[in-house]
Every structure is written in C-alpha cells, then in structure tokens.
Image (tube, rainbow, N blue to C red):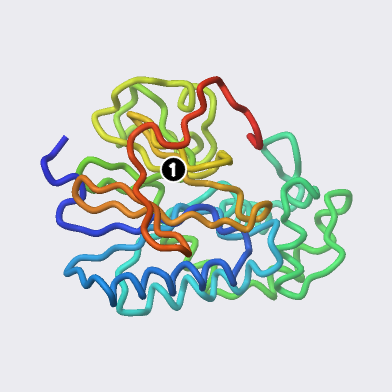
Amino acid sequence: MPTDLTEGHRIYAIGDVHGLRALLDATLARIRADLAARPHPKPLVICLGDYGDRGPDTRGVYDGLLALEASDLPAAFLLGNHDSYIPAYLRDPEWYDRTYHWLHPAMGGAETLASYGVTDATERHPAATRDAFSRAFPAAHMAFLDRCALWRRIGGYVFVHAGIRPGVPMEQQEPDDLIWIRDGFLNSEADFGFKVVHGHTIVPAVEHRANRIAIDTGAFRTGVLTCLLLEGEETALLTEQGIRPLPLGSGVPSWRNLWMRR
C-alpha cells in the first residue's frame, strides 16, 4: 500500500442512507463543522449508495445529494443495489432479480414511490403504479443515478457499495457483485492489495478488519448513519460526540455474528 493511504485527502465515507434525509443532513452538518474546526485542503465526501427505500424521504435524500454535488464540498457518489431498482422498475415493472420484488415490504420500494406522491404501490400489481412514478420521478434524479460510479479507488482504499469478488482485478469486477455481493467477500481474509470500505451488509458496530471496513449500521432500523473518517493512516468515526478512533479489530466479533444480515 502507498505511504499516504488517502493521497492527501481527508475522506468522509457515509454509509447506507435509505431514505432518511434528516440523518443525511445531520451527518453533512457534522462534516462541515469538523472542517470548520480542522480545515483541510483536500476534503472528500464519499457516499456508498443505497440512498433510497425503506425510509420515508427518498426524494428528499436525492435532493440533498444533488445539493451536496453542487456545493463547495467535494463529493463522490456510488451506486447501491437499491438505487439500481429505480431504472429497472421503470424499464420493466414486473422484473426482479432476487427473492423479493422491489415493491415487496422487505425491500422498501413502495416507500420510495410514496415519497414522490405515488401511493398504494404493491408487488402484487407492480405495473399499476409504473406510469405515475415515471411522471413523478425528476429527470435530475435519474441523471444523478446515471452519474453514480460503481467503485472508487484512492490510495490504499477501494470504496464500493457491497464489496468485491476476491481474485478479480477491479477493472474486471462484475457490476452485480459490486452492488450485491456477500458470500465470497465477507468471509474472505485475502489481502486484496487495498482495504475495501463498503456498506450493504448491516453490522451492529462498524467492523475494521485487515482487508475491509464495513460501515452500514442499519440507519433505517437503528437511527445510526455512520461516517467513517480516513486521513493518511488515521481511521476514525465522526460521531455526534466527536471523533472516535477506529483501530484495527474494532467491531469484529469473536465468532461469526450474522445479526442483522440481510
């Protein structure tokens, strides 16, 4: 790994927001307050995807991300599996690729439609609300989704929504793995040549492992939206109480804890 693990940046990585605009706003305010107290020439916010579904204000979250993109605070945005469902639903409302349709209560797509004023969405009749959602979904929001990257490397870190397929070069990774993978990645102890920062799989506390850092603390269930702070060799959490160091081994269970995995 390079000597400067963040290539001169101070990075603020934000976990899965899932339609919680108030938590997003509070986290961004905390970042700005930290920068006001400790100015840095190269700050960068990286949002790890899953901006919508489950929470009540997906529309507000996308509006907030567009405002961040247009602000003076540099930011990068990654695509999550839940974000990918919006264009997929508009292309073919009957389609789904996993156990549940996007409009099933377990997935939270109906909450996203409701945030755009489209009510009574159900997986039993998914086509019934497709046209109304197409009319309600702003072109600016679709353009934002189109701009989201699948991964980003900075120094000794790779940022991605779900994870990577071990043994596959980043340029050859399958998009489906980058936004969906669990098995094969979460149980890998391989040295990837970089440390992967990811969300997607909920953990009860941020896990800092030798080859990855998991930061999805299930905000839509717990009210905790994690912000990971990386600067050079520093690894910490930016919390309501301030900066909390996150040394290697933090949050790692002594046995295979599958609590809140989904």
Say whether residue 122 is left or right of residue 245: right
Location of residue 209 by image quarter: top left
Q: Which residue is mark 1?
A: 198
Residue drawn at (72%, 44%) of the image? 95
- Counting from the top left corner in percent of width and height, residue 137 is at 64, 72
Residue drawn at (37%, 78%) of the image? 70
Location of residue 262 by image quarter: top right
Question: In the rendered image, is residue 262 in sight?
Answer: no
Q: Quadrant of the N terminus?
A: top left
Outermost residue on the front side: it is: 241
- Are there few (<14), some (14-19), or many (20+) residues within 10 Å of tag 1? many
Question: Disc 1 marks which amino acid?
Answer: His
Residue drawn at (41%, 27%) of the image? 165
**In-front residue for pair 64/81:** 64
Residue drawn at (76%, 46%) of the image? 106
- Counting from the top left corner in percent of width and height, residue 133 is at 72, 68
Say whether residue 128 is left or right of residue 260: right
- Counting from the top left corner in percent of width and height, residue 47 is at 43, 58
Q: Secondary structure at mark 1?
A: strand
Query: Is residue 186 positioned above or below 150 on the image?
Result: above
Outermost residue on the left side: it is: 3
**In-front residue for pair 163/220:** 220
